[in-house]
Image (cartoon, rainbow, N blue to C red):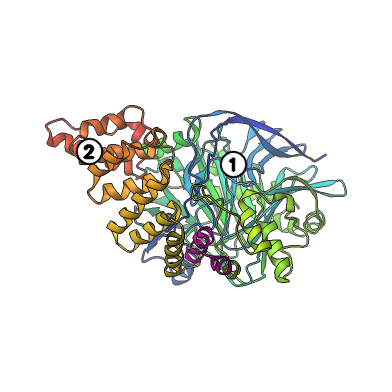
Amino acid sequence: MSDLRVEPYWMPAAEIGSRNPLPDIKTVQYVHSTVTIGEHVTEEQRKYIGFGGVQSILPYQLLDGYQRDLSPRAFKSVVLENETLRAVFLPEHGGRLWSLYHKKEQRELLHVNPVFQPCHFALRDAWFSGGVEWNVGIKGHTPYTCDPMHTEIVRVGDAKVLRMYEFERIRRCMYCIEAYLPDGVETLFVKVRIKNAAGVDTPMYWWSTVAVDEHPDLRVIVPATKALECFYNGSSYWLDLIGVPETSHGDCSYPTNLHRVTDYFYDIPKESPKWMAAITGDGKGLFETSTMRLRGRKIFQWGTSVGGRHWQEFLSHGKGAYVEIQAGLARTQLEHLPMKAGEEWSFVEAFGMISCDPKAVHGSWAQAQQAVSDAIVRTLGENTPDALAADEVFNLASRSQGEIVHLGSGWGALENLRRQQAGEAPLSDVLRFPAESLGAEQADWLSLMQTGAFPDHDIADPPESYMAQAQYLPMLESAALSGNWYALLQLGVTRYALGDAAGAREAWLQSVKNRESGWAQRNLAQLDRLDGNTEEAIRRLARAVALLPDHWRIVHEYGTILNNSGQSARFLREVAAMPETVQSHPRIVFLKAQALCRTGNPQAAEDLLANGFVLPDIREGEISIADLWQEIQREQQAHGTKPKEIPYELDFRMH
């Protein structure tokens, strides 16, 4: 009989660390950068490319406070199990499907990272590899990938369904993931529901990202003969339509054939069944299929370059390599689709193991496609995604409340309180956002709604959270009339998030005038930077550092702009007087190495990098360390020293 239970899941883990208190002022827009489109991409395929991009992660805060020290940790997990499969979910971290184990075959179907190690892959920075990630709203990984989701066990007769849900604050949508493993069935079914609760039309996005172990004989098979090949060249995405699986870089259906990091978005005919499979040399592996709304399919592979291999090791502390097969609403991940106000979309995905004739799946592309298609049909039988979309248990569960076993964020509860105050309907009649989920992040906004003012804040205290919702502007403007520095700070952030940079500057200038804070000075400096007023940005950042000397993130912004404007000697002088906790942070050590190189001391710069230096939050695609190493070697060569190759542990170049 199918079972659903909560139990601890132990693994070595790094701590997420503190949230970044600095609002994102156009620092993560690289993920939504320009796209260069090749001549073979049709007009229909171009239609939504670039639509719905964002220039800031606000109102979310960046998660960049993690390091790389591991210690044993018990994660809360929810286990869904029947006679054949055991599925493990992590409700504390985006509801990630962490493991899907086939008990009869004694075979893990997913890539299960043996460690929990955040790395800089998401718009909010922290991300971890492994399992199946549920990405909603915006490109760049779900904002909740390292945050908790509301989690319930829903009972329908003898059946149990797992439900996880949240309120996504950029698109202002609710999304709900319901997992069901019927008795006697060898397939896990996941129903996803997304509702636009913004009151206006909005761009929407969904991709289920499935990690599987990489093997030299792993083949990824899709019912397509064309794909949109995509790679990032440092300033723009390149996209063009090509034939598959044979490409100019090799047979892309075998990921280890390829050298460079590349995405292939498969062009599956509109009316064809939607599925993917990752099959090893024995003819066995994981398949994913869905109802027709989930039209996109993709493979991502790290390639065989030094940087690609290094990234694999960095994500798992050297304990596992993987590739990703993915399924999405649009054809590519460079697109968002328009979703009408109040509209709800739903689809069902199925995940399971199939067994095929090895000669067929590793034969011609047509043979492999037919073998996998037949095996999926055999495995599913009558239990297709379409059948489960109409299943009575699934549909009753979607209309029923369950037992809450884990709380998510308090943002849905806060939105319901705002709606109640405004005379609007709640987010949902079924999905509960309990009042007990309200916490420190929501406290300021709860006070604003209830009293019209913020609590008193010391200028040294980091803001707990920010808001990017237009309905709060009248409340913020009213609170700011008192001249309260914090109300003006928050008003500026909300205005900036809503696209009013001039209004943001006005609010922050008034905040500084009424009571100077490092937070407002830093925000003004970032606007100056964007306007090209480097000297004013430096002046304001210097003041912010003086007011908040213990905050390495502000020092990092200050040091970066000094180094980039030829003032490295000034940075070295000033950083030497800063607290040791700031000086020793890896981002500051990197800036010191850069400054040393640029002030005529390349050997000291090299020594800082060559003695076990690690940058925990180096961003996916970032080549700053390699660039600095090459800069150091050029200076060394100019001083008569033979240049050295970049050490493997510093090389994250993916192309």
- Report if residue 199 is visible in the image: yes
Q: Amino acid at mark 1?
A: Gly
Q: Residue at x 44, y 72 (%)?
A: 43
Q: Which residue, given by chain and number where applicable, does mark 1 sit on? A: 131
- Check disc 2 and report the residue beneath it: 597
Q: Looking at this view, is 130 or 249 the one in front?
A: 130
Q: Considering only vertical position in the picture, is 399 above or below 353?
A: below
User: Of tags 1 and 2, which is closer to the observer?
Assistant: 2
Point out the stretch of residues depicted in magenta.
476-496
Residue 593, disc: none
Residue 161 on image: x %, y %: 77, 48
Crowding near the residue tagged with mark 1, few <14, some 14–19, many ≥20 C-alpha atoms within 10 Å: many
Residue at 45% x, 37% y is: 312
Q: Quadrant of residue 104?
A: top right
Q: Is residue 605 magenta?
A: no
Asked whether 305 or 556 is in front, the reply is: 556
